Amino acid sequence: MSEEEPYSVMVEKSAKRYLEHLPKEMQQAIHQRMKELTRPFSVPNLRKIRKYDKTYRTRVGDYRIIFVVDKKKELFL
């Protein structure tokens, strides 16, 4: 069985700016989870957001990463 092709992860500017103001330890934890999102359906604590098509969230400490899965195998954070 072949392995699923990884997704591309695209982060919005506002999310990048917000991330810059977090403590270094939390930045590292979030970056690690973002790397894991190249294979989003294997990420722990993954939840579908109701009422929004193709929108999911995952938790990292007190923070949540919200993302949309695109048909072109792209994730938008």
Image (tube, rainbow, N blue to C red):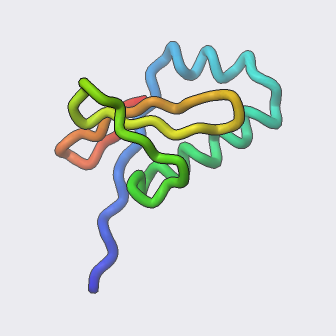
Residue lying at 45% horizontally and 30% vertically, measured from the top left: 66
Q: Give coordinates of residue 61: x percent, y percent.
A: 71, 36
Q: Which image quarter: residue 41? A: bottom left
Q: Which image quarter: residue 3? A: bottom left
Q: On the rendered structure, is 41 left or right of 65?
A: left
Residue 27 vertical placement versus 12 (above, below): below
Q: On the rendered structure, is 34 left or right of 63?
A: left
Which sits in the foreground, 41 or 51? 51
Residue lying at 30% horizontally and 29% vertically, measured from the top left: 50
Figure quadrant of the C terminus = top left
Residue lying at 75% horizontally and 22% vertically, measured from the top left: 22
Residue 26 vertical placement versus 71 (above, below): above
Figure quadrant of the N terminus = bottom left
User: Furthest residue to the left?
Assistant: 71
User: Furthest residue to the bottom?
Assistant: 1
Residue 28 vertical placement versus 18 (above, below): below
Q: Give coordinates of residue 65: x percent, y percent.
A: 52, 32
Residue 68 vertical placement versus 42 (above, below): above
Residue lying at 21% horizontally and 31% vertically, measured from the top left: 53
Q: How many callouts does the rendering have?
A: 0
Q: Give coordinates of residue 20: x percent, y percent.
A: 70, 20
Q: Which image quarter: residue 9? A: top left
